[in-house]
């Protein structure tokens, strides 16, 4: 049942409309993440091990690298969600804020003005937008959500992302980023960085906020998404290039992190260029 109704990749990141009825694995994104309910039964989402409801009255914002997973409440019919993955480099230059793309609150009220903007932008995404048109609408929506999240931020402590300062963790990240592969042995990464396995896992999580496995999965998903929309390579070849021993293994991984099969995602995905 889970399927992509519309997917656009561009310099802003990704703008998507999904019909979802299956849970995701715990995952993370390098981008900021905004989730809006636009039809059907509200769902739940766990962000940093705290549960929130995504419905008509609330917006959920996930900061870069915050672990989260989606939990549907209607597994028969699913529900429709407008989901944005916001590139921090696109957002930050015009924001002129020290914290960049960091939302002030995970869950905040969906005001009447925000609701109108959400529905207008979601309808645009489901149509055939030009990059200039969609870029402007997304800028307005994301800026409005950002401001609203900080307007109510005093209700909870400010969240900050851990800065990677340890040279050994930076080396681990470089080794994983240079050639992300599902068959990478993280124990070997730890040894190459001069760390024991327990120390590696503790230090990596304290520096990045996520486990090494979750970090690697994020890198694999980024490569998979890029390959699906930027190339015509067969699904099996994309999976093999990423280190999966079978197409079914890659499909399970992709569906667990995106909510649908890679063939369904590719069918809907388009790249917008200036």
Image: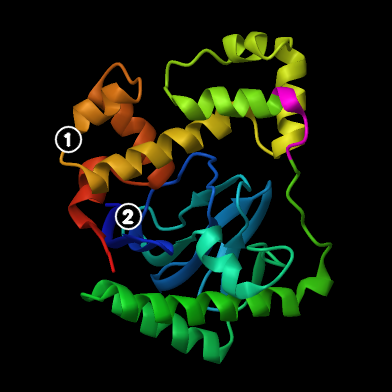
The residues tagged by marks 1 and 2 sit, at their Cα atoms, a distance apart of 33 Å
- In front here: 194 or 118? 194
Image x and y of residue 181, in percent: 42, 22
Image quadrant in which you'd find residue 156: bottom right
Residues rendered magenta in the picture: 164-168
Say if residue 256 shows up in the picture: no
- Decide which of tag 1 and tag 2 comes sooner along the chain: 2
Asked if residue 59 is among those painted magenta in the image, a careful observer would answer: no
Say if residue 156 shows up in the picture: yes
**Residue 76: numbered disc:** 2
Residue 58 shown left or right of residue 129 in the figure: right
Q: Tell me the mark number nearer the camera, choosing from 1 and 2.
A: 1
**Residue 127: numbered disc:** none
Residue at 40% from the left image edge and 58% from the top image edge: 74
Q: Which residue has dot 1 on it?
A: 233
Give the structural element (helix, strand or loop) at label 2. Answer: loop
Image x and y of residue 121, in percent: 38, 80
Magenta residues: mostly which secondary structure?
A: loop
- In front here: 231 or 238? 231
Image x and y of residue 137, in percent: 41, 81
């Amino acid at each position: 049942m889970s399927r992509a109704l519309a997917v656009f990749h561009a310099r802003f990141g990704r703008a998507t409309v999904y019909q979802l009825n299956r849970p995701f694995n715990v995952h993370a994104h390098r981008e900021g993440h905004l989730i809006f309910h636009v039809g059907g039964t509200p769902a739940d989402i766990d962000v940093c091990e705290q549960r929130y409801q995504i419905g008509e009255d609330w917006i959920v914002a996930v900061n870069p690298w915050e672990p989260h997973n989606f939990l549907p409440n209607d597994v028969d019919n699913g529900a429709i969600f407008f989901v944005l993955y916001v590139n921090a480099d696109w957002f930050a230059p015009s924001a002129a804020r020290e914290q960049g793309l960091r939302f002030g609150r995970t869950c905040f009220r969906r005001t009447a003005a925000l609701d109108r903007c959400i529905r207008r932008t979601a309808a645009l995404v489901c149509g055939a937008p030009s990059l200039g048109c969609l870029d402007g609408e997304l800028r307005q929506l994301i800026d409005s959500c950002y401001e609203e999240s900080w307007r109510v931020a005093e209700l909870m402590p400010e969240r900050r992302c851990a800065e990677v300062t340890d040279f050994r963790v930076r080396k681990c990240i470089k080794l994983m980023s240079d050639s992300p592969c599902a068959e990478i042995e993280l124990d070997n990464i730890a040894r190459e960085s001069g760390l024991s396995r327990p120390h590696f896992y503790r230090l990596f999580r304290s520096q990045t906020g996520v486990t090494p496995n979750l970090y690697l999965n994020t890198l694999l998903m980024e490569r998979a998404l890029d390959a699906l929309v930027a190339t015509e390579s067969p699904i099996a070849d994309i999976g093999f290039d990423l280190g999966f021993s079978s197409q079914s293994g890659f499909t399970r991984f992709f569906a667990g992190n995106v909510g649908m099969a890679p063939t369904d995602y590719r069918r809907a995905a388009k790249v917008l260029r200036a």
